[in-house]
Amino acid sequence: MNELALIRAIQNGDEQAFKQLVDRYQLLVRNTCLNFVHDKHDAEDLAQEVFIEVFRSASKFRGESKLSTWIYRITVNKSLNFQRDNKRRSFFQSIGDALFGSEKMLGVSTVSAEGQPEQDLENKERKEQIYRAIEELPERQKIAFRLSKLDDLSYQEIAEIMQLSLSSVESLIHRAKLNLQKKLYQCYKKGI
Amino acid sequence: MKHRAIKEKLMFYMEDSLLAKEKQEIAEHLSHCDECQQLLESLRKDLALLNFEKYTENDPYFYTRLKARMEVPAQPASRRLWQPALFGALLLLAISLGTVVGKQFSVEQGSDDGLTSELVPFDGLQEEPIEQFLLTFE
């Protein structure tokens, strides 16, 4: 079934067509979500939300762009909203912790560290460091960089997803790389 | 090219997205600059880690879990709003308390009959001229 036929079938409530769409795009959606939230549990949750949104707004798809572009757009928007909610939640959580005492389970990190080889732990720290550096980039640079570097999308595809011109995407990614490099150099300097 | 300019291009050198001339210049610089060599190595290691964690195949139970979630009615928004609402209320309470305490403080100042509110300039030199001070200073 081609893309348009698939989405028309979903609009008509064809469950089999929806399953086909989920099977076709779940890898794309789950990986993009993981690239944004860096946690498999959250990524799974988020991927489900994306497909629910795809199902609910199937009637809005007019076939002007590729189906994958439309799904990417929903995924990126959902991921950004998730991150914003998460930031808000952790803000209130930190105030709550300050007022009523912290309930953080310190054991979690200890448990995950236990029994892991030193190399894994070092890689984990380095990964956290680079994710933090990416997180600190301006929003549009962050999105463009992630889609390019982590999702391996072409600049043209990113331009379609972000609804920007090709030159804007090129410039965003160039600046993102420069900024990221600068932030990482600062981390190396501090010896993190 | 200077050391600083080369440092700024290391990521692009690593991705092989520079012109041949620039690449050659950087390669030459790297052959004798330990700092740039280390930075390049660290960048290479860090960016390689990004592609480490990826799903490579479909989860066969994903659709089942998705369908199960779609059948559950959506949670009311009020449940997600209680925390910000509680903090908002606490903040309001704190501000009101601060205002009340502040008002009480200003009332006390008003009932002062102007005795302390008036500034009396103090001229130490008139009380004890500097010459006298120096004469008596041991």
Image: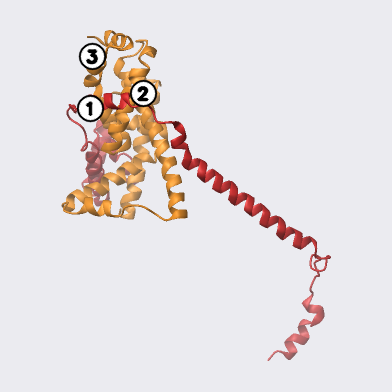
Chain colours: A orange, B red
Q: Looking at the picture, which amino acid does disc 2 mark?
A: Ile
Count the labels in the image.
3
Q: Of label 2 and label 3, which has the lower sequence position?
A: 3
Report x, y in % for residue B72.
33, 27
Q: Looking at the picture, which amino acid does disc 1 mark?
A: Phe
**Chain letter of disc 1 in the image:** B
Residue in the picture at 27% in, 54% down = A107
Q: In the picture, residue A31 is in which quadrant?
A: top left
Residue in the picture at 35% in, 39% down = A134
Q: How far apart are marks 1 and 3 (CA)?
A: 15 Å
Is residue B92 toward the left or the right of residue B102 in the image? left
| Label 3 crowd (10 A; few <14 / some 14-19 / many >=20) | few
**Front residue (pair B28, A143):** A143
Q: Mark 1 points at which residue?
A: B62
Residue in the picture at 80% in, 63% down = B111
Q: Mark 2 points at which residue?
A: A74
| Label 2 crowd (10 A; few <14 / some 14-19 / many >=20) | some
Is residue A190 toward the left or the right of residue B114 in the image? left
**Front residue (pair B116, A48):** A48
For the N terminus of chain B, the quadrant is: top left
Q: Mark 3 points at which residue?
A: A16
Report x, y in % for residue A65.
34, 13
Is residue B81 toward the left or the right of residue A187 in the image? right
Residue extending farthest right: B113
Q: Looking at the picture, which amino acid does disc 3 mark?
A: Gln
| SS type, badge 3 | helix
Report x, y in % for residue A30.
26, 29
Residue in the picture at 32% in, 21% down = A71
Q: Do labels 1 and 3 share a chain?
A: no
